[in-house]
Image (spheres, rainbow, N blue to C red):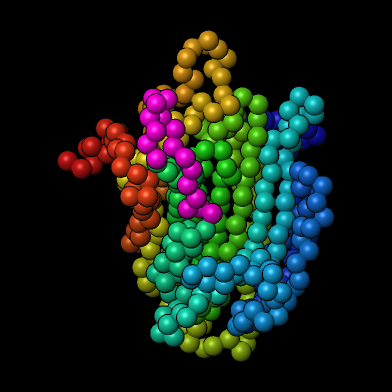
């Protein structure tokens, strides 16, 4: 298509994607990606080096390392692409920020391996708990005199968690739904050794007039065209382990085919709170143009609840493996305050 639209915004051409190769010492990582086309002038994308080590990060400038209580990480590739609609009328419709990150666990037990699906799933669960995905924001209330100090989650995640087999590599896939106005997040994780893993993370931003919140933007600009690029990139990924990789690690990698594949989901209480948060923010920078003078421009509670229910319902992707045990991620309700959220009929039924 010559021009895009809000329903089908135009992004980079996959036909012009280039081959990217990263030497990780114990493995070679290869994939394809289009040249950078960020929404704002920035020449810093795709400037990372081509040689990193899963064994240590001594060859990485300390300023490029990110640390938390569980791991040390370094971004080994970054890129950004703009999506546009009709010229002048719509223009910028969004963009994708893309980051490939190499992470190594701290003080990881020698008898535990990320090549075991349950261990990787637990590492991803911990990553969510300490990353920007666990951010909170101030709550809002219908009563302007309600001064309750309450924190709400900014994201609901992981959702649609599943294991995918691509080119003989098993990936743990998950998404995170924004509840305010931040990006929709898609992430793939794969183990590289007993204590190191790589993640491919896509931060999808969408923008439209009169749709300044996470619920309304879904009705204006679908994820479809953005996810097409995501899947094209991931279908091109190849990981080749070097000949001197530890034999025991390769054996564990092969054995993983026969074990339970645990997935990560948000707890029912977390999901219920997310419905309320998304509903309360559903009038942010939005006016019902059919009834511009009405007092409350929020969406119907039932519509928001149905939206979240659809998001948390498993949607298997191609090459998805059978789901195993569910590991739940909880939002710390104590840190959110003492104010109760009225449960929906679905949750009341679940508890009966």
Q: Is residue 284 visible?
A: yes
Q: Tell me: 234 left or right of 1.
A: left
Q: Where is residue 274 in the image (x, y as percent from the top left)?
A: 41, 40
Magenta part, dominant SS: loop
Residue 44, image quadrant: bottom right
Residue 122, image quadrant: bottom left
Q: Where is residue 264 in the image (x, y as percent from the top left)?
A: 40, 57
Q: Where is residue 111 in the image (x, y as percent from the top left)?
A: 40, 85
Question: In terms of depth relative to the viewer, which is nearer, 11 or 129?
Answer: 129
Question: In terms of depth relative to the viewer, which is nearer, 337 or 204?
Answer: 337
**Residue 227 drawn in magenta:** no
Q: Position of residue 61 (x, y in %)?
A: 71, 74
Q: Can residue 15 be seen in this view?
A: no
Residue drawn at x 56%, y 19% as measured from the top left: 287
For the C terminus, the quadrant is top left
Q: Tell me: 186 left or right of 143.
A: right
Q: Tell me: 206 left or right of 140.
A: right
The answer to whether residue 46 is above or below residue 309 is below
Point out the stretch of residues depicted in magenta: 132-149
Residue drawn at x 52%, y 38% as measured from the top left: 180
Residue drawn at x 56%, y 38% as measured from the top left: 181
Question: In terms of depth relative to the viewer, which is nearer, 199 or 287?
Answer: 287
Residue drawn at x 77%, y 57% as measured from the top left: 45
């Amino acid at each position: 298509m010559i021009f895009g639209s809000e329903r089908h915004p135009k992004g980079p051409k996959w036909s012009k994607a280039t081959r990217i190769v990263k030497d990780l010492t114990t493995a070679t990582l290869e994939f394809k990606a289009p040249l950078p086309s960020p929404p704002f002038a920035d020449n810093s994308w795709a400037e990372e080096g081509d040689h990193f080590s899963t064994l240590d990060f001594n060859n990485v400038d300390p300023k490029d390392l990110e640390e938390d209580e569980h791991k040390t990480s370094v971004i080994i590739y970054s890129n950004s692409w703009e999506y546009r609609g009709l010229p002048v009328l719509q223009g910028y419709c969004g963009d994708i920020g893309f980051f490939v990150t190499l992470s190594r666990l701290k003080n990881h037990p020698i008898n535990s391996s990320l090549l075991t699906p349950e261990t990787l799933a637990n590492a991803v669960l911990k990553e969510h708990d300490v990353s920007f995905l666990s951010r909170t924001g101030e709550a809002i209330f219908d009563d302007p005199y309600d001064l309750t100090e309450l924190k709400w989650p900014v994201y609901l995640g992981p959702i649609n968690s599943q294991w995918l087999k691509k080119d003989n590599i098993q990936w743990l896939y998950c998404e995170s739904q924004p509840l305010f106005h931040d990006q929709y997040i898609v992430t793939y994780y794969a183990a590289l050794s007993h204590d190191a893993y790589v993640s491919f993370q896509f931060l999808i931003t969408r923008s439209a007039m009169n749709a300044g919140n996470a619920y309304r933007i879904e009705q204006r600009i679908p994820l479809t065209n953005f996810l097409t690029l995501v899947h094209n990139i991931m279908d091109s990924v190849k990981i080749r382990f070097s000949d001197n990789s530890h034999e025991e690690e390769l054996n564990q990698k092969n054995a993983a085919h026969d074990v339970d594949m645990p997935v990560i989901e948000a707890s029912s209480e977390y999901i219920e709170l997310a419905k309320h948060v998304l509903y309360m923010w559903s009038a942010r920078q939005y006016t019902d143009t059919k009834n511009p003078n009405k007092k409350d421009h929020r969406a119907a509670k039932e519509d928001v609840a149905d939206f979240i229910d659809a998001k948390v319902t498993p949607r298997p992707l191609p090459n998805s493996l059978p789901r195993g045990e569910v590991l739940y991620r909880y939002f710390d309700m104590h840190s959110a305050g003492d104010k109760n959220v009225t449960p929906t009929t679905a949750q009341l039924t679940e508890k009966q």
